[in-house]
């Protein structure tokens, strides 16, 4: 069976091998967070806005899409209703929707959707490397110029990173650029991260050396993942993102004990299940 890797799961392993194990091998459930769900709803609004004619892509129209997209999510993912239990009343939900509305309004100060005609939105991309590893994921938006130049765009509902963390933020974009380069034979011209949390745009122009380095990196990551599955060595890597993790009770770094490793751990790592969408929380 072929093996597959997405930027989300590659980032998990780089952040903490044990987190990767909990998500991919143990398949532990995780509670939805207000930040992550807000990110998903904002992404859905920005995607659907481009279904409308250019002249109708206004701030008001986008903000009017918010509640319908929230209601759509409730139908698709009933578990998110637990974020706003009846005891909390409508007030918390209204405050949450207002924060999402603010993010959308900020996007209009960064880009003008009346002048954009994306080639694709929520575009699924995949390619198989020469060692048999499949790379796959979803691109928020792909803009294609008349001369064929590609701009890969990703919306982030958090704040832009400091320079020290820019490389980590760009890894996902370079991952997508590598897949597009391999499938379309053309190097993307611009990788663009749009940070709605503080209204900044991070742009990067990749070259072949960049993407070849990413290819080597994901191959090395995959070898490390397979080795961990073969040896059972899924050690935790404590850091500042631990506060976002749902699995403290099972983490040795927090005094917990992980469950026994499933006998088919390697098969689960190599499995080709449904492609998960990237996390949409305020950190990404």
Image (cartoon, rainbow, N blue to C red):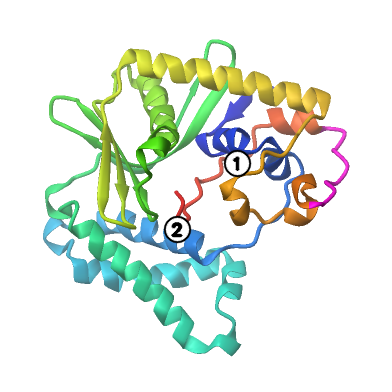
Identified at 35% across, 20% down, the residue is 181
Quadrant assignment, res 66: bottom left
Tell me which segment is drawn in magenta: 255-264
Query: Which of the 4 quarters of the picture holds residue 231?
Result: top right
Across and down, in percent, residue 110 comes to: 19, 52
Q: Looking at the image, is 197 positioned above or below residue 227?
A: below
On the image, numbered disc 2 is attached to which residue?
40
Residue 157 drawn at (x, y percent) = 38, 56
Q: Which-is-in-front pick, marks 1 and 2?
A: 2
> Is residue 4 depicted above or below 278 in this figure?
above
Say how many tags the image has: 2
Instruction: Determine the secondary structure under disc 2.
Output: helix
Q: Secondary structure at mark 1?
A: loop
Residue 52 in sight: no
Q: Which mark is residue 274?
A: 1
Is residue 75 toward the left or the right of residue 101 in the image? right
Query: 266 and 65: which one is in front?
Result: 266
């Amino acid at each position: 069976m072929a093996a597959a890797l997405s930027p989300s799961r590659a980032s998990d392993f780089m952040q903490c091998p044990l987190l990767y194990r909990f998500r991919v091998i143990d398949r532990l459930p995780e509670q939805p967070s207000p930040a992550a769900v807000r990110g998903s709803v904002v992404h859905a609004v920005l995607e659907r806005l481009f279904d409308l004619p250019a002249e109708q892509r206004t701030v008001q129209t986008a903000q009017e899409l918010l509640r319908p997209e929230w209601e759509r999510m409730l139908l698709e993912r009933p578990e998110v209703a637990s974020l706003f239990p009846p005891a909390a009343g409508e007030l918390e939900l209204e405050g949450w929707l207002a924060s999402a509305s603010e993010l959308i309004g900020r996007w209009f100060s960064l880009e003008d959707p009346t002048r954009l005609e994306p080639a694709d939105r929520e575009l699924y991309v995949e390619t198989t490397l020469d060692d048999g590893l499949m790379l796959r994921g979803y691109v928020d938006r792909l803009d294609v110029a008349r001369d064929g130049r590609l701009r890969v765009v990703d919306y982030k509902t958090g704040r832009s990173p400091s320079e020290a963390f820019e490389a980590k933020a760009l890894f996902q974009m370079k991952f997508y650029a590598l897949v597009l380069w391999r499938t379309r034979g053309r190097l993307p011209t611009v990788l663009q991260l749009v940070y709605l949390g503080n209204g900044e745009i991070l742009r990067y122009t990749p070259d072949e050396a960049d993407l070849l380095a990413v290819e080597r990196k994901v191959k090395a990551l995959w070898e490390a993942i397979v080795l961990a599955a073969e040896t059972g060595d899924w050690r935790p890597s404590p850091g500042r993102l631990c506060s976002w993790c749902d699995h403290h009770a099972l983490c040795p770094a927090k005094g917990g004990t992980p469950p026994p490793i499933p006998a088919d751990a390697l098969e689960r790592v190599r499995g080709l299940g449904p492609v998960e969408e990237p996390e949409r929380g305020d950190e990404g």
